Amino acid sequence: MTITQFCLVRHGETDWNAAHRLQGHTDIDLNARGLAQADQMARALKKINLQFDVLYTSDLQRAAKTAGAIERLFKTSAISNSALRERHLGALQGLTTDEAPLLEPELWKSHLSRNIEERLHDGESIQQFADRIQTALEQIRLQHLGKTILLVSHGGALDMMYRIASNQPLNAAKAVAVPNASLNWISHNGHAWKVDSWSDISHLEDLALDNLDL
């Protein structure tokens, strides 16, 4: 049986995370706390002497800069992959969770209901997002069978990976937290996915924010 392991890392904190502002594809930089979290995460991986074969990252800078802490410490280079981006949240991008129900009430209501076909006015539906993430995961797995893959992405994307690995329905309420700079493990045995451990933030000096994307 060939086991392929994934260590999934959410990016460090941004100012928009702290403001409860929906980011989606908006390319927001890490804040000072986020940079510190990235360093703490990379040092934790070094401390457990993680032997990984390849490092992937979303191309958005909050993920790429988080991966940068791993690149520096492990003297490696990340493979940038735009398919690992957060869900495109359409008209909700840039709004806080307080502004959205006031400025886009019907859209916000549909979003909260987890209508899997809702595209949020030129955004990406949950179904489209799930298909993108599943395709990316499968392509990476098949390219590195039996290897350990370190992957830096986003809260909503990691929540989707949890759903894929645990067979959680797309329209079900969020079941797990995905804090900034958390470590999350899934694996595939050649037949099925499995969640091995989730939401480890024991390496962080302060509390980390959960993902806003529902």
Image (spheres, rainbow, N blue to C red):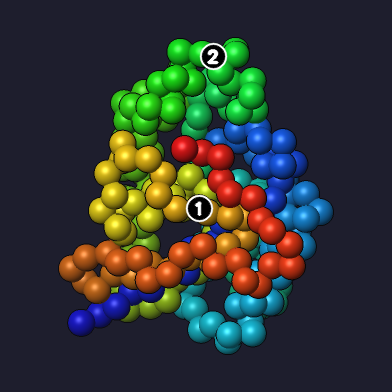
The residue nearer to you, when weighing 49 against 136, is 49
Local secondary structure at mark 1: loop
Residue at horizontal 49 percent and vertical 33 percent from the top: 88
Residue identified by numbered label 2 = 104
Tag 1: residue type?
Ala
Q: Position of residue 106 (x, y in %)?
A: 46, 13
Local secondary structure at mark 2: loop
Say the numbered circle drawn on residue 103: none
The residue nearer to you, when weighing 17 against 5, is 17
Quarter-of-image position of residue 194: bottom left
In this rendering, position of residue 12 left or right of residue 146: right
Residue identified by numbered label 1 = 177
Q: Answer yes or no: do the residues labelled 2 and 1 have beta carbons within 8 Å?
A: no
Does residue 74 sit above or below 143 in this rendering? below
Q: Position of residue 112 (x, y in %)?
A: 43, 28
- Mark 2 or 1, nearer chain start: 2
Q: How many marks?
A: 2
Residue at horizontal 73 percent and vertical 50 percent from the top: 30
In this rendering, position of residue 18 left or right of residue 5: right
Packing grade of label 2 (10 A; few <14, some 14-19, many >=20) is: some
Q: Position of residue 116 (x, y in %)?
A: 32, 30
Q: Distance of mark 2 from mark 1, alpha carbons?
A: 25 Å
Does residue 28 sit above or below 176 in this rendering? above
Residue 207 seen in the current view: yes
Packing grade of label 1 (10 A; few <14, some 14-19, many >=20) is: some
Residue at horizontal 58 percent and vertical 55 percent from the top: 179
Tag 2: residue type?
Glu
Q: Position of residue 37 (x, y in %)?
A: 71, 62
Does residue 97 sit above or below 61 in this rendering? above
The residue nearer to you, when weighing 107 against 83, is 107
In this rendering, position of residue 65 left or right of residue 116: right
Q: Residue furthest left?
A: 191
